[in-house]
């Protein structure tokens, strides 16, 4: 029997983080394999433990190379997600459990948008690229949000669950995203938002939340196209306490504007908080001191003043499509190989 709140609902309160090294999507070099061998798990866990030990010692080697980074183009290395403890390496090769490929089933158009963003909305755009507007940069880089999808496994911080009769509130440390979820099964508000509108209900010991009515923000630049808010996105999420310090999270994503079929992921969250040691979120000061956008755009304007012809060299998605008519490769879209270089 899971712990209960004073008003008789399952108690999900705590500060929860995904503490596994398993990537969302199956690496291309593990195609067709849903699990690692015991030897591969031991090898990965050894590397993980060694990297954390080096971090405790203050070694620069805690920063992974680009191939080992779980983030696109290594914008965020281990410094930003460092907890002082090794993450768990389990045998699963992806958090995605359906489809069986372990890959997000992007539509052909979404694949091209993702490839474009991977090349241009990154720290290393081609030399000829110039950002015309702040909207050419990623929503997270602009300190807005990385979206609702992925909050349980992505970002630089954990999630805090707070409950009161009839409500569950999820506070994501990164960007201070807040999801206020009524749990009486009511219809969600008609007002569309970046994070959508949620309607929750209890099914025995499981909190089930359906989120719809997202604002259409597909015209914005997103590091991951799958997370971009669209009017047709529909999330069904489930949280279930499975132990004193563990909670299972399941999500099914439906969005015909980006995906050829619904897809599902499962993972385990670990409670970082104890009754004797409550965890306090630090301020996530992102926009303060964010000189990157100002410097990027002012540099572009100065280059254009020096050479007006540069205005015609700006790269946009339509031009990119003309120059890249073929299908993008999975290697340009998916996560990197595991550190062990498993074939």
Image (cartoon, rainbow, N blue to C red):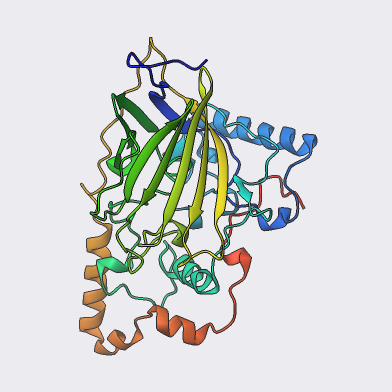
With respect to residue 227, does 107 lie above or below?
A: below
In the picture provided, is 39 more to the left or to the right than 72? right
Q: Residue at x 59, y 77 (%)?
A: 327
Along the horizontal axis of the image, is 63 left or right of 283?
Answer: right
User: Along the line of sight, which residue is nearer the eye, 318 or 14?
Assistant: 14
Q: Quadrant of residue 51?
A: top right
Residue drawn 49% across the image and 67% down it:
114
- The x and y percentages for residue 41 are 72, 36
- Please tell me how many numbered marks the rendered image carries: 0
In the displayed structure, does residue 315 sit left or right of residue 107? left
**Which quadrant of the figure has residue 198?**
top left
The image position of residue 228, as x and y in percent, is 39, 59
Q: Quadrant of residue 308?
A: bottom left
- Residue at image position (37%, 14%) is 277
Residue 71 can be seen in this image: no
Residue 331 visible in image: yes
Q: Is residue 278 above or below residue 87?
A: above
Q: Is 97 displayed left or right of 136 in the figure?
A: right
Q: What is the x, y in percent for residue 274?
A: 42, 15
Residue 116 position, x and y percent, is: 47, 72
């Amino acid at each position: 029997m899971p712990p209960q709140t004073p008003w008789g609902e399952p108690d999900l309160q705590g500060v929860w983080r995904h503490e596994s090294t398993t990537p969302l999507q199956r690496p291309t070099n593990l195609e067709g394999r849903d699990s690692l061998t015991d030897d591969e798990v031991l090898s990965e866990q050894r590397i993980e433990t060694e990297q954390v030990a080096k971090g405790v010692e203050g070694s620069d080697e805690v920063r992974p190379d680009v191939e080992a980074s779980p983030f696109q183009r290594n914008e965020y290395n281990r410094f930003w997600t460092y907890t002082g403890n090794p993450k768990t390496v389990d045998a699963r090769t992806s958090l995605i459990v359906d489809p069986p490929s372990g890959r997000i089933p992007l539509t052909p158009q979404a694949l091209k948008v993702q490839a474009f963003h991977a090349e241009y909305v990154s720290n290393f755009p081609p030399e000829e690229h110039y950002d015309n507007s702040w909207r050419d940069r990623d929503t997270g880089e602009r300190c807005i949000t990385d979206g609702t999808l992925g909050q349980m496994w992505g970002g630089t911080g954990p999630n805090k669950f707070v409950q009161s009769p009839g409500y569950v509130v999820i506070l994501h440390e990164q960007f201070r995203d807040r999801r206020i979820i009524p749990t009486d099964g009511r219809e969600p508000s008609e007002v569309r938002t970046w994070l959508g509108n949620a309607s929750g209900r209890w099914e025995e010991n499981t909190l089930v939340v359906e989120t719809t009515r997202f604002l259409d923000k597909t015209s914005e630049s997103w590091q991951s196209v799958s997370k971009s808010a669209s009017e047709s996105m529909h999330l069904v999420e489930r949280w279930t306490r499975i132990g004193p310090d563990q909670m299972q999270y399941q999500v099914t994503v439906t969005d015909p504007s980006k995906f050829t079929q619904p897809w599902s992921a499962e993972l385990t969250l670990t409670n970082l908080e104890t009754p004797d040691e409550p965890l306090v979120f630090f301020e996530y000061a992102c926009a303060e001191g964010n000189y990157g956008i100002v410097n990027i755009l002012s540099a572009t304007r100065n280059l254009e003043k020096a050479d007006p012809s540069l205005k015609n060299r700006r790269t946009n998605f339509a031009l990119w499509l003309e120059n890249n008519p073929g299908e993008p490769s999975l290697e340009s879209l998916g996560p990197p190989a595991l550190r062990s270089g498993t074939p």
